[in-house]
Image (cartoon, rainbow, N blue to C red):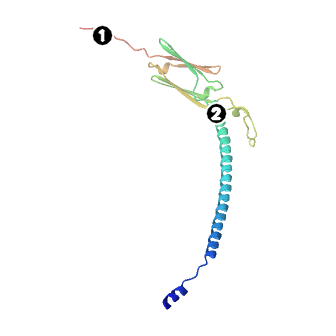
């Protein structure tokens, strides 16, 4: 029995009420911290949501501006040259529109059955005398500027050295003689 009394004395005595109170206090602390954490998360997510919305609005504005710039570029860059090609029995006739392009800015190349025309459409800025410290700003930019090139493959071989070209009123007109294939009659023996 003495042994039992010693064991009872060695065990710490727990007060149930104190333990319950400590548990409740711990729960309250955890709940309070969870509430604070929830509030912080709510504020962060709200701020992040607003920031993302602001970012999306800004990105849409940038996209709209870029789309406008790209469209302006497409509208004012000569992607290909406008032309007519006519086939007459022994010749081709080619008329190409090159408004505003000087003769020295036009290059015509011919090969066995192809004509290539290159032209450089000048910018309006080249016509303006301005002080070097002034940066001009286009209010409307509708004229095509820059280099354009177009190749035309012809169905028949051409006489390269007999091609004639004339420039008149913003167009060039080419007369392109065809190579006439000789035909032989083969005699049967």
Quarter of the image where the C terminus is located: top left
Residue at left 50%, top 18%? 162
Marks 1 and 2 close (CB-CB < 8 Å) = no
Residue at the left extreme?
Answer: 189
Q: On the image, numbered disc 2 is attached to which residue?
A: 71
Q: Foreground: 151 or 49?
A: 49
In the drawing, does residue 142 fall left or right of residue 114? Answer: right
Q: Relative to 1, is 184 above or below?
A: above
**Residue 128: x %, y % from top left:** 73, 33
Whether residue 66 sits left or right of residue 177 in the image: it is: right
Residue 61 percent across, percent down from the top left: 68, 41
Task: Residue at 51%, 86% (x, y): give it.
Answer: 7
If you read the primary sequence from the N terminus, does the residue marked by circle 1 or circle 2 appear first? Answer: 2
- Which dot, 1 or 2, sits closer to the camera? 2
Read off the residue under disc 1: 186
Query: Looking at the image, which residue is at 66% across and 41% down?
Result: 60
**Element type at marker 2?**
helix
Seen in the picture, residue 2 relative to 62 is either above or below; the reply is: below
User: Where in the figure is residue 23, as x and y percent of width and height?
Assistant: 62, 71
Describe residue 109's horizontal placement relative to residue 38 as left or right: left
Q: Nearer the viewer, residue 106 or 72?
A: 72
Q: Position of residue 8 (x, y in %)?
A: 53, 85
Q: Is residue 20 above or below residue 43?
A: below
What mark, if any, has residue 46 been given in the picture? none
Q: Secondary structure at mark 1?
A: loop
């Amino acid at each position: 029995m003495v042994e039992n009394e010693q064991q009872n004395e060695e065990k710490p005595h727990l007060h149930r009420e104190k333990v319950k109170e400590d548990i409740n206090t711990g729960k309250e602390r955890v709940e309070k911290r969870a509430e604070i954490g929830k509030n912080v998360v709510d504020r962060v997510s709200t701020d992040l949501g607003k920031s993302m919305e602001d970012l999306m609005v800004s990105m849409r504005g940038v996209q709209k501006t870029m789309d406008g710039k790209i469209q302006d570029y497409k509208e004012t860059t000569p992607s290909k040259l406008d032309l007519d090609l006519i086939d007459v029995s022994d010749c081709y006739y080619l008329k190409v529109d090159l408004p505003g392009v000087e003769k020295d800015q036009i290059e015509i190349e011919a090969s066995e059955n192809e004509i290539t025309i290159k032209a450089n459409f000048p910018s309006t800025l080249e016509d303006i005398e301005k002080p070097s410290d002034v940066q001009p700003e286009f209010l409307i930019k509708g004229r095509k500027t820059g280099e354009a090139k177009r190749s035309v493959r012809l169905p028949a071989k051409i006489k390269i050295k007999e091609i004639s070209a004339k420039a008149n009123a913003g167009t060039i007109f080419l007369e392109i003689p065809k190579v006439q294939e000789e035909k032989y009659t083969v005699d049967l023996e």
